[in-house]
Image: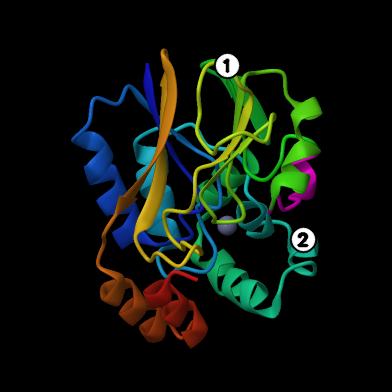
Amino acid sequence: MRIAIVSDIHGNLEALTAVLEDIDRRPVDEIVCLGDIVGYGPDPAACLAVIRGRRIPSFMGNHDQAAFDADLRTTFSLLARTAIEWTAPRLDDGDLAFLRSLPYRAELHGATFVHASPRDPGEFEYVMDDLDAARQFGSFTTPICFIGHTHDPEIFREDLGPRMVDAEHRCLVNVGSVGQPRDGNPKACYGLYDTGPLSFEHVRVAYDVPATAAKIYQAGLPAQLAERLVLGV
Ligand code: ZN
């Protein structure tokens, strides 16, 4: 079974559309979303409409939760808080009810899926490096666990071996970000997971970055949110 895993869409409709077009051209059986559908980007409601319309199973991201949980916003950076305060009033009751209903983690297709970390999904901790990753392997039992949250595509192996997925080694895989890549590559990123023989690859997809940037300026969102999309940071 082939599963496409998207994460951190962040209201970027151009990136989401390009990624789904790429996925639809491949023999993919299911799409899973690791959350942060909204926040930062100029099209939160349109991105929610796509995810809800296609009935893509999704998990709770910190920006998704902050759309209805004002307390969580107090932990955000000024940039993130400014953006979620712009976002929340642009969602209708159905969107907010959908976001409230998102689960934090689940096991599907022999893997664990969670937005930030399997150890404490509601805390949204950042798994940045091998040491952070090493602390996570006791918190899931499947051979592989998929995360997003840092927007940095990465493969962490329990044996600290090469950054690749195989059937012999347990892995924690960050699928990267659709709508706001931060690894210096502005192309949208998502993951392709094959349940057997077990394999995984990151896929990069070009999209119309200037169109999204123009919408960010037009919306009156902070200009930095447009500039970072151009650079992929
Ligand atoms: Zn995010």
Q: Position of residue 110 (x, y in %)?
A: 56, 15
Q: Measuring 58% from the left and 51% from the top, which residue is drawn there? A: 96
- Residue type at tag 1: Glu
Give the left or right position of residue 141, taking residue 96 as reference. right
**Residue 39 appears in the rendering:** yes
Question: Residue 62 appears in which quarter of the rendering?
Answer: bottom right
- Residue type at tag 2: Leu
Q: Position of residue 47 (x, y in %)?
A: 40, 53
Is 80 drawn above or below residue 125 in the view shown?
A: below
Q: How is the image coloured?
A: rainbow
Mark 2 beta carbon near ligand 1 (under 8 Å)? no
- The verdict on residue 127 being magenta is yes
Is 200 drawn above or below residue 37 in the view shown?
A: above
Numbered circle sitting on residue 72: 2
Instruction: Examine the residues drawn in magenta and state their main secondary structure.
Output: loop
Residue at mark 1 to residue at mark 2: CA–CA distance: 39 Å
Residue range of the region highlighted in magenta in the rendering: 120-128
Mark 1 secondary-structure assignment: loop
Q: Earlier in the sequence, mark 1 or mark 2?
A: 2
